[in-house]
């Protein structure tokens, strides 16, 4: 019978939490049910997915990295951040 390494349960409790990438990294992340993907936030903002990616690289909008390729956005937080930073009157977004 092969022996497999065992991991105590306490080791799984030390998993890293999702990283928050924005201009203010200490802000709490909203509930996961409110997060949307890049296509949805692009449609909300009225720009292309590529433009959203450029905004992410320039830290122009807040986003949450849940994994290597899983990036999500809180639409309310993005719109309020744009309104604060750029003084743009973005349309109010209502949560579903």
Image (cartoon, helix red, strand yellow):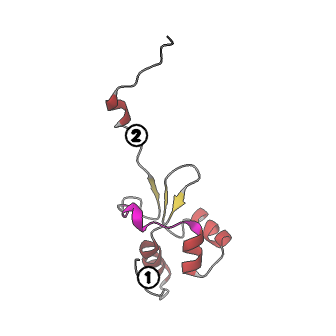
In the displayed structure, would residue 81 be above or below residue 66? below
Instruction: Give SS at disc 1.
Output: loop
- On screen, residue 71 versus residue 54, left or right, reads left
Residue 15 numbered mark, or none: 2
Residue extending farthest to the top is 1
- On screen, residue 89 versus residue 29, left or right, reads right
Say which residue appears at 57% left-offset and 49% top-offset: 68
Say which residue appears at 41% left-offset and 59% top-offset: 25
In terms of image quadrants, where is residue 13? top left
Query: Quick one: label 1 or label 2, which is nearer the N terminus?
Result: 2
Residue 41 spot, x, y in % from top left: 54, 73
Residue 80 numbered mark, or none: none
Count of numbered badges drawn on the protein:
2
Pick whichever, 66 or 27, lies toward us: 66
The residue at which mark 1 appears reads as 93
Q: Which residues are magenta?
A: 29-38
Pick whichever, 20 or 59, lies toward us: 20
Q: CA distance from mark 1 to mark 2?
A: 33 Å
Residue extending farthest to the left is 10
Residue 60 spot, x, y in % from top left: 54, 70
- 89 inside magenta stretch: no
Pick whichever, 83 or 91, lies toward us: 91
Q: Residues within 10 Å of mark 1 (few under 14, many from 20)?
A: few
Say which residue appears at 60% left-offset and 62% top-offset: 57
Instruction: Give SS at disc 2.
Output: loop
Magenta portion: prevailing SS class: loop
Residue 76 spot, x, y in % from top left: 42, 75
In terms of image quadrants, where is residue 37? bottom right
In the displayed structure, would residue 62 be above or below residue 79? above
Q: Residues within 10 Å of mark 2 (few under 14, many from 20)?
A: few
Say which residue appears at 52% left-offset and 69% top-offset: 61
């Amino acid at each position: 019978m092969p022996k497999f390494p065992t991991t105590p349960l306490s080791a799984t409790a030390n998993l890293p939490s999702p990283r928050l990438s924005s201009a203010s990294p200490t802000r709490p992340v909203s509930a996961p049910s409110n997060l949307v993907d890049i296509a949805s936030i692009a449609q909300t903002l009225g720009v292309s997915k590529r433009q959203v990616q450029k905004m992410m690289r320039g830290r122009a909008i807040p986003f949450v990295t849940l994994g290597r390729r899983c990036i999500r956005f809180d639409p309310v937080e993005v719109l309020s951040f744009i309104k604060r930073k750029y003084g743009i009157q973005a349309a109010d977004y209502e949560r579903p």
